[in-house]
Image (spheres, rainbow, N blue to C red):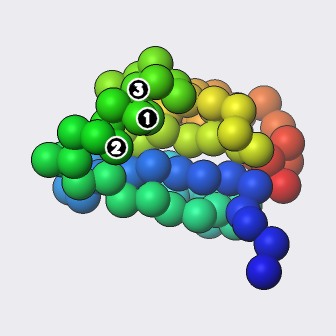
Amino acid sequence: MTPQKVKVYTMSHCPYCVRAKQLLAQRGVSFQEFLVLEEDDAQWDALFQKSGLRTMPQIFCEDQLIGGYSDLAELDEKDKLLSLK
């Protein structure tokens, strides 16, 4: 099985995480989701080292940071997320 090109780091009870996943699905972009527990300090620290962000969701395409939901929505306005396929 081929690893997904798009990775979405999420947390439970996060409306922006839900919106990001819905937008990706709506545009037909397959993705792999990683649920980060609020109390998992090690994973939060690792994500911060990778992205510089402390918010969720954190969206990556081929290990390049796209950003959060707002960044994803902005990219959608530009090219309907075709650049992620």
Number of marks in the rendered image: 3
Three-letter code, disc 3: Phe
Looking at the image, residue 74 sits to the left or right of residue 36; the answer is right
Using the image, tell me which numbered label, if any, was put on residue 43.
Answer: 2
In the rendered image of this protein, does residue 82 appear above or below residue 27? Answer: above
Using the image, tell me which numbered label, if any, was put on residue 47.
Answer: 1
Question: Which structural element holds mark 3?
Answer: helix
Residue extending farthest top: 52
Three-letter code, disc 2: Gln
Question: Which structural element holds mark 1?
Answer: helix
Residue corresponding to mark 3: 48
What is the CA distance from the residue labelled 2 to the residue labelled 1? 6 Å
Q: Kindly identify the residue that appears in the image at 56 percent across and 41 percent down.
A: 59
Quarter holding residue 31: bottom right
Q: Kindly identify the residue that appears in the image at 78 percent across and 30 percent down.
A: 78
Three-letter code, disc 1: Leu
